[in-house]
Image (cartoon, coloured by chain):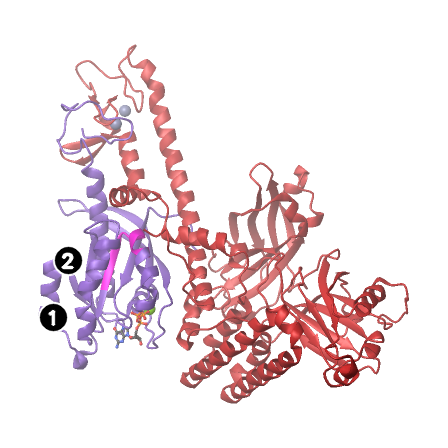
Chain colours: A purple, B red
Amino acid sequence: MTDGDYDYLIKLLALGDSGVGKTTFLYRYTDNKFNPKFITTVGIDFREKRVVYSTRSPNGSPGKAFKVHLQLWDTAGQERFRSLTTAFFRDAMGFLLMFDLTSQQSFLNVRNWMSQLQANAYCENPDIVLIGNKADLSDQREVNERQAKDLADKYGIPYLETSAATGQAVEQAVGALLDLVMKRMEQCVDKAPGAANGAGTAGPEPPAPRGARCAC
Amino acid sequence: MTSDLNLNFLKELEREAVLEVLYRDQAMRKIEEERVRKLKMQLQQLRWKGTRSVSHEYQERSCARCHRPLGLLLNRGAVCNGCSHRVCSECRVCLNPCLWKCTACYAHGDVKIKAGEWFFEERAKKYPNEGRHETVGAKLLKSYQKLSEYSMCSYFWTLHLQELCQTKSFNKSVENLFLSLTTHMKKISKSQNDMADRSHLTTDYGQHVEKRKERRSQSDTAINITSRVSKSLYSVSGTVRSVWGMQSLSSSHFLCSLNSTCTEYGNFGKANVTGEIEFAIRYIFKACVLEISIRGCKNLAYGEEKKKKCNPYVKVYLLPDKSPRSKRKTAVKKSTVDPEFHETLKYKVEYPQLGSRQLQVSVWHAGALKTRVFLGEVVVPLAAWNFEDRSAESFSWYPLKAKVTLGFCHSSKLLVSARLSVPAQDKNFQLEKQMREGPSLQIDDLAVLYLFWGSCLILPDQTEMKQRSPVLKKEVCPRWKHLFVFGDVSPARLQQSCLHLTVWDQASLGASDRFLGGAALGAKESFGLRDPGSEALLQWQKVLSSPNTWTDLSLVLHPNKERFKS
Ligand SMILES: Nc1nc2c(ncn2[C@@H]2O[C@H](COP(=O)(O)OP(=O)(O)OP(=O)(O)O)[C@@H](O)[C@H]2O)c(=O)[nH]1
Ligand SMILES: [Mg+2]
Ligand SMILES: [Zn+2]
Ligand SMILES: [Zn+2]
């Protein structure tokens, strides 16, 4: 189904308690459909989606557009699969940490998921978006926005309330994460040695070896 | 960190589901690797273009990238900090008002991002001892492939459930049914395990027969419930009967979620078969790679005739392996009956193996909701292919055909052990015992396996005793441990009897099973003519003349279905 005609392969991963709606959320994102049935995920799965990502240059004018191939890993929330699912954390570039707005417990468990991420992700502070899902079930809500926002602020990550049922903020949530990952990607490349000291001809440091990039 | 991780903790079908995901991931990774390889190659070319100018540099000042001369006062160029080459203003990429790189260095950084190198670099800081580019999925697959010499699991079961899960009437009650089936399966598989224990069997096979009956009745009850619950589940009965050898199932939930993971066995539809496909086959001896270059098709039938819709793609299997390992697919082309693919699908396979392989090239329509419609196929037996002849490597058009019956290598030998068990603890009671329990013929250890075996013992009075083995995953040459036990037949009658062994490829729902080959053992004039000196007779006599010992037989499979009772 896929061909190699894209500029970036970005791997994101959804995690959170069983039943919070990870699979349903991703299905909404990739296929724009809602599945009301609960079919718990066995171990791991993934979905794919091709999107166009446009950068904005610092002065606000639209920059280049890139084709981004998203590999969206879906993990089982069930404890039984934990060793398998956490192992997959290390291959992902960004994370959709999800809880269920109608389940206080799933929210409390966000802390545990955060520490799992710190332990198993590719770096200590990976890009994460906190997602409170099932926003459509307002009458059953157990977690209020303030609480969740505070927690997200504590971790310094964005927080969004979504609904896989209505599609509310689903695109935005993935978009926000993709933004973070793309930014980090650019930083990683720019902060490489030599990149820091401005324009002009050769700086004080010796010419960089073959592998390094310009810092002219 | 993941070195001790494996899939062993998963239940059989869960493992299959996870493997399916891992194989899909592998396919994606291949595409990514190819993309990155191309990127790097382009970069290399750009660099190379630059380095040629180094020698010129001292003779005349010129731009390292475009080789245009540089002036001493005007247009002097500037030295790029990355590569220390002097470049003209044209050959710079401005990242921001005070930061530029020369085109080659820019491309280098660009490739680095685009290849995801930034990520691997970051990760290597945290996990310096892990393979830099290796993914967990790849690792798991590797360790799995190493470990599993051959695991008894059932693709077919997966397949059937898959189809059932997708039917609309799949509802709560059916889920419950699966749960109940599951528990049956577990019990059943226990008794199946017992069966594999030969020593246990030889001493009290009577008890064993008992077990078999019990097993039957269990699956039969399950079947009854099934057909009552839903019409769409009607054909599950056939499946259930044949899968009693499988290991275990987890839960109905799990079964359902298969449909999101296995696209392979989705809803199959039927279309007329028309048109042709163009491809080329070659074998690269150096790399041990079989390459199938798919160029395109023409005049395909519409996958959805009414809507005049067709999104074709090509799927290839290196038969007889029909596991995901053997599957290769092209991209799906949208809205065309004359698709062009220009894709090369590859198999790493040893040359001697090709003789027993067939290339199955099929065309499918990818419809909405994972529906798949079969548009035709071509099966190329590789035994007859001349890989050393370069002219055989050129592209040819092949007419698409409806499903072809799978051919069976005629030289295929079937290894069977058989024995006549005569219980004889007490000589005085031997006869009596015999009458009550009867001697048993046990067949074991079939070294060549295709899916499932039917076995039919034809007695002198033309009564037939039929049995069927469980369905096994298709593999090239798996070892098969299955016992057929025929009881209640006296040795005298056996002398006059004949045993037919047939191999079948179990078909998906609705279709009838495909006959692959058969072999006969015995005294009866099985093929219309009596041949007293025949191999079949001699081998049979050998078994009967040495009771209570295992006799190894090697039988040749015949392709002619009419010769066999099944
Ligand atoms: N009303 C409503 N229901 C939702 C929403 N998102 C998910 N659900 C339902 O919640 C149930 C669980 O969703 P899943 O996506 O399967 O849960 P999961 O997080 O993938 O669970 P595991 O695979 O077990 O980890 C399903 O019945 C969904 O239909 C939502 O936004 N609104
Ligand atoms: Mg799920
Ligand atoms: Zn230049
Ligand atoms: Zn440079």
Closer to the camera in the image, A143 or B448: B448
Q: CA distance from mark 2 to mark 1?
A: 14 Å
Residue A79 location, x and y as percent? 30, 68
Instruction: Determine whether, in the image, residue B544 is placed left or right of residue B304.
Output: right
Does the image show residue B470?
Answer: no
Image point 20% across, 63% down: which residue?
A: A112
For disc 2, the marked residue is A157
Q: Secondary structure at mark 2?
A: loop
In the rendered structure, the residue with mark 2 lies on which chain?
A
Q: Nearer the viewer, residue A38 or A6?
A: A38
Q: Amino acid at mark 2?
A: Ile
Q: Which residues are magenta?
A: A88-97
The circle drawn on residue B360 is: none
Give the secondary structure at mark 1: helix
Q: Where is the C terminus of chain B found, in terms of image quarters? A: bottom right
Compared to residue B207, the image places residue A132 above or below, namely above
A92 falls in the magenta region = yes
| Mark 1 lies on residue | A145
Evaluate whether residue B433 shows in this view. Answer: yes
Q: Residue furthest top?
A: B59
